[in-house]
Image (tube, rainbow, N blue to C red):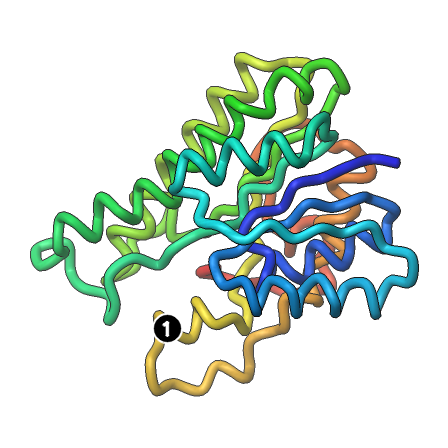
Amino acid sequence: MKKAVITGASHGLGRALAAGLAAAGYALIIDGRDPRALQAAVDGIRAAVPGADVTGLPGDVTDPVHRKELAARAGGIDLLVNNASTLGATPLPALADYPVDELRAAFETNVVAPVALVQLFLPALRERGGAVLNITSDAATEPYTGWGGYGAAKAALEQASNVLAAEEPSVRVWWTDPGDLRTGMHQAAFPGEDISDRPLPESVIPAFVRMITERMPSGRYRAAELAPALGKGERA
């Protein structure tokens, strides 16, 4: 049985992707900062996918101790999904007003932690011909007002992914934009607005599962391109 680690899997896209990979036959180690929400995710996946092998490990990916615990608990894996992310300062400020401490924290979560986890898991991924999936956003490539902090961090993650793909030819490296989804983080970006017209995270899971199971070449992907019927999406 193949094994995957998915960070930030207690809510939203991470939880939906965990359920999709469990259904595809993966054993899972998932994490999240809220122990109750994480346990609810584990219970929900087990209920939806009878026989699912899923373990939750509460913690924050910016904590080096938690990262080491995650690597020790997971052991050899076939897939690392860096999904844990932070929007940064909210309401979304202009770069001229962006609190530097919050910008630093956004980079710590969105860039430093994924790279640190890659470093921990690379030996196993090389040995097993595994893969790294980094969740990104079109805010990494488009100049949306107010999205400078989050977008800059995701742009850094994209370039780190691009270089990793060049340096590690035996490992698949994907950085993938899921599109504009109905998640708590997306709601936080648009406080007070109705985002019920956005698709649920579950709608893009077939695109991700296809990319993973078909072992598509390393590179940047958009979920809408992998499954055109999903339609176009923007900021994740």
For label 1, count other residues whose C-alpha is less than 10 Å away and answer few (under 14), some (14-19) or many (20+): some
Q: Which residue is mark 1?
A: 188
Nearer to me, 229 or 199: 199
Q: Is residue 197 above or below residue 143?
A: below
Instruction: Choose top left, top right, bottom left or bottom right for residue 96.
Output: bottom left
**Lateral position of residue 140 relative to residue 202, left or right:** left
Residue 188 horizontal/vertical position (percent): 37, 73
Q: State the residue in front, 77 or 219.
A: 77
Residue 201: image quadrant is: bottom right
| Residue pictured at 71% horizontal, 49% vertical | 208
Residue at point 67%, 26% (across, down): 172
Compared to residue 95, the image places residue 184 above or below, namely below
Query: Which image quadrant: the N terminus?
Result: top right
Query: What residue do we see at 54% from left, 24% from top?
Result: 120
Residue toward you, 142 or 93? 93
**SS under mark 1:** helix
Q: Residue at x 54, y 15 (%)?
A: 166
Amino acid on which the number 1 mark rests in the picture: Ala
Horizontal side, residue 87 vs residue 177: left or right = left
| Figure check: 50 above or below 115 | below
Residue 144, image x and y in percent?
Answer: 30, 59
Q: Position of residue 68 (x, y in %)?
A: 51, 31
User: In x, y percent, where is residue 22?
Assistant: 81, 52
Q: Can residue 12 be seen at all in this image of the molecule?
A: no
Residue 100 visible to an observer of this rendering: yes
Residue at far left of view? 96
